[in-house]
Image: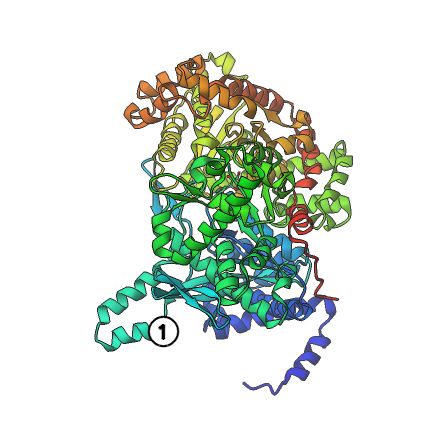
Amino acid sequence: TFTGLGPAEIKNVEASIPEPLREAWREHKYFVRHVETTLARSLYNCDELAAYSGTALAFRDRLIIEWNKTQQRQTFTDQKRVYYLSLEFLMGRTLDNAMLNVGLKDVARDGLSDLGFRIEDVINQEHDAALGNGGLGRLAACFLDSMATLNYPAWGYGLRYRYGIFKQEIVNGYQVEIPDYWLDNNPWEFPRHEITVDIQFYGNVKKYQDENGRISNSWEDGEIVQAIAYDVPIPGYGTKTTNNLRLWSSKASSGEFDFQKFNAGDYESAVADQQRAETISAVLYPNDNLERGKELRLKQQYFWCAASLFDIVRRFKKTKRAWAEFPDQVAIQLNDTHPTLAIVELQRILIDKEGLEWDEAWNIVTKTFGYTNHTVLPEALEKWSVPLMQNLLPRHLQIIYEVNLFFLQSVEKRFPNDRDILSRVSIIEESHPKMVRMAYLAIIGSHKVNGVAELHSDLLKSTLFKDFVKIYGPDRFTNVTNGITPRRWLHQANPRLSALIAEKLGGYDFLKDLTLLDKVEAFVDDKAFREEWAVIKRENKLRLARHIKATTGFDVNPNALFDVQVKRIHEYKRQQLNIFGVIHRYLSIKAMSAEEKKKVVPRVSIFGGKAAPGYWMAKTIIHLINNVADVVNKDPEVGDLLKVIFIADYNVSKAEIICPASDISEHISTAGTEGSGTSNMKFVLNGGLIIGTCDGANIEITREIGEQNIFLFGNLAEDVEDLRHRHFYGDFKLDPQLERVFDAIKDNVFGDKADFSALTSSIEEHGDYYLVSDDFNSYITTHEMVDEAFQNQEEWLAKSITSVARMGFFSMDRVTNEYADSIWNVEPLDVTD
Ligand code: Z2T
């Protein structure tokens, strides 16, 4: 029935409601309205999924308003913006985060509870936005959170994949990949059908004389694919700033070209063209730290770079500023080399379309870009075949050759007596076929290059990019150690711990300035505080135990030491070292007397992570973990002393359950191979201790929390090369304890030994590239120290509390401010001013 209430009267009704209830009333009103109208349901047949949608839509309304205001304000002020270009944004779920950022989760909890729903169940209805593989993609998501929270005018640009990272199922111990179709009913994206860009591929380059008599190049013919923008609001925590993430989706161009085919009756071929175009944004490549050089991947890269650059340039041109001001208005950060074509595309736009001279344009380009490198692993460094690029992007290849020519000329002038340096630093590798080295192009086209942890950045300077340090000097290269957002990884994932800290610190300010955590250390001897801390850890372990029971059917003892390794499965991350250690433990227990068994500290070894579908060794490791679990978990001689769990389909929302529940977690990569690692930070921030190698950010974590609070083991990065060299020349002896483990595998204790022969022989016979045998003894000994330490619960607790108190450095806010100051030169803009 029509109430006769206009906006003014509604305002009056609102005003008549007592202030503390007003938000609750609004929330309820939005919720009911969306359930009844947007979803066309009644409150009487509102299930959990509808309750999720209604809540999400209610919060979405709030975000949209702030989002519009933020964008208007940023456009009006027209100060420098940051554009973060990433092929991956591993966002996870949005609703919980949105409720916390807006500060109304408690209101929503009460409202939902009045309607008979538990907020956790409602939150669990949401599908993860899983547009990423692992650390690199999650870092991009943490960046977005921090940039909004700190009020930086910043946009993310990415691809709107129809399929995110595959879902993992374990069938008979093997990984099986299921497509992740995630787009239906996603309330968090807004299609902008009016924002489109035509993207060209193939074709050829023609020279012509322009009106000033200048010889110019024009890229002609080929085929056109249309990019359509989809926008996602990115709210900051405790601020009105709501930034934008723009994801591009591909579609066949609606240009004349296609209509001609339709009109000519060539219906089938026109539809095929359409499907081919849509394939570009169809699927995320599921490789972490591996590049396979597929043409479709290159198409994705160019499609996304060209659409983003067009968009950025279009926005800049509206301001009518001179081109020389471009770098004062625009900072573009390249998340690894995947967006390196953006450098070439900007140069092309400036010289071919806007008529700038080469030098003037190149000066603008290099001032605009910054490049972040995430790995030194050679198999992850992008190289594109010259013939492939010649065919797909003929004009870009010309520009790359020109950039290379000018670069090599300048190098030759500076180092006239160095015969080899030119071939070493050339963007073009003189192989068959020739290859474009994208990292070199990224360095040459950027004003700053950074690594993601101190050791990693040092290694870049002393190995991979050594020549470039010589050429450009050390100032172009810098380090910005990674971080994580404390909003998601403490407050959202571990609300009770966050509340306990807030109670002691007098509020939640630490979520915006994580260095305030240092005040927690004053409570390390406070009895009540310590008890509460321990209770929270136990609760979190129980929560994980329930998840394990529900998903695997196994019961785990919450008093046992929970030992967790969750991350992408990769030989360099050494899950094989961990599972061999577990087998060693199992064999030791089996050999014990009843008396000896009484002294054993019960353990649950928990694994999780996806293997790239084509990475056979990684899949073999998963298989071994599951087979070991099968044998160990039902062995009555072992009972509660050891359980092995593989959690299928590890993703962001599972990480939120797992990270708060560890006693110890494993970050055990071969020294010098892990760029940074970020789950190490998540676990410590949640009061878990870690065992790790001197690698990536483990080193800085140790420096911050103190070496008495971490379990370090293994060879150092500086010794790795020498050890590998020795292995290669036959100087290798399998560690005797590891030999015992291999003997058990070869006795078919964990299934058919043939299934694992590639794994054991990679160590015994093929050089043990990742030094599993070299580090095995030290690994086992260190785990014995872990057991020992765990028996002294009081000291363990002190380590846990002290470590959390000292984790302030690893906030993504510190990281974002460092990029802003030393790379982007951008200032925050408070939209509430
Ligand atoms: C990735 O997740 C990482 C590096 C890559 O290099 C690619 C992917 Cl998909 C091309 C990871 C690093 O392995 C990890 O050490 C680091 O913490 C993370 O990026 C974020 O910097």
* Residue 380 rendering spot, x and y as whole percentages: 44, 40
Q: Residue at x 45, y 23 (%)?
A: 772
Question: Label 1's element?
Answer: loop
Q: In this rendering, does residue 52 appear at all?
A: no
Q: Nearer the viewer, residue 384 or 157?
A: 384
Q: Quadrant of the N terminus?
A: bottom right
Q: Is residue 7 above or below residue 815?
A: below
Q: Amino acid at mark 1?
A: Gly
* Residue 631 rendering spot, x and y as whole percentages: 37, 26
Q: Quadrant of the C terminus?
A: bottom right
What residue is shown with label 1?
A: 255
Q: Residue at x 75, y 44 (%)?
A: 516
Q: Nearer the viewer, residue 806 or 657?
A: 806
Q: Nearer the viewer, residue 206 or 223?
A: 206
* Residue 552 rendering spot, x and y as whole percentages: 41, 39
Q: In this rendering, does residue 703 appear at all?
A: yes
Mark 1 close to ligand 1, CB under 8 Å? no
Give the crowd class for mark 1: few <14, some 14-19, many >=20 residues within 10 Å.
Answer: few
Q: Is residue 590 above or below residue 286?
A: above
Number of disc labels: 1
Q: Is residue 685 above or below residue 84?
A: above
Q: Is residue 56 above or below residue 428?
A: below
Picture quadrant of residue 746: top left
